[in-house]
Image: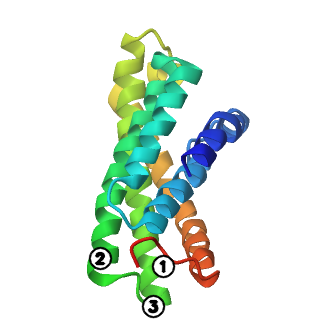
Amino acid sequence: MSALWVALNVSVAPIIFSLTNMPFTCDFIHAIMVFTTSYASMEFGIATLSAIIVLIVTLFQRGFASGIYFLGFVLGALLIDFLLSLVLKFRGLGGFKRSFIVVEGLSIVFTAFSGFIIGLIMAFLQPALGVRNPLVIQMGGWIFTSYWTGMHTIGGIISGPIVFLVLKAIERAGVRPHGS
């Protein structure tokens, strides 16, 4: 999963972002990779470990100053690893409606949290490292962070149904998560 995530992150995600300049379009890739990795392994920390591998490759590929934003997705993966493992171990995804609500909610939490961390990095850390973002300069640090969090939250709202369909397709194909 890490190799696929790396390939998508260094090839497809930058193209999508450069075409749209909207962060929520890349949330599809990251949300699908985090949820499928966590769901397929049923082991706490596997999605986070995958995200760390992607972070390392991203740092090598883009450089520290430009690639450190991905730390937001690593921390988001850690949060989802924790929350999804609790849901799957104690309640399971259950029926169609319940599982949709859980996946949609977790998708929003993942992207909003990741977007907040990425916004902080872009607004406060990257300028100290010499990376200048015109939106940060125009809006100011905290307003930009709020804006970026909101844009990623939109990404979570849109990504949730896609993630849900991917997980249901995996389930319907008879693929059993590792822990079951």
**Callout 1 secondary element:** helix
What's the mark number on residue 100? 1
Residue drawn at x 48%, y 55% as measured from the top left: 34
Do callouts 1 and 3 mark residues in contact (Cβ within 8 Å)? no
Residue 156 seen in render: yes
Asked if residue 91 lies left or right of residue 167, the reply is left
Q: At numbered mark 2, what does the secondary structure look like: helix, strand or loop?
A: helix
In the rendered image, the vertical position of residue 68 relative to residue 48, given as above or below: above
Q: Position of residue 165 (x, y in %)?
A: 60, 74
Q: How far apart, in angstroms, are the residues tagged by discs 2 and 1?
A: 17 Å
Mark 1 against mark 3, which lies toward the viewer? Answer: 3
> x and y percent of residue 63 in the render?
52, 17
Q: To which residue does mark 2 refer?
A: 89
The amino acid pointed to by label 2 is Lys
Residue 113 in view, yes or no = no
Name the foreground residue: 131 vs 51: 51
Image position, residue 64 (x, y; %): 46, 18
Mark 3 — residue?
95
Q: Of marks 2 and 1, which one's residue comes earlier in the chain?
A: 2
Looking at the image, is 158 positioned above or below residue 136?
A: below
Identity, as a three-letter code, of the amino acid under mark 3: Gly
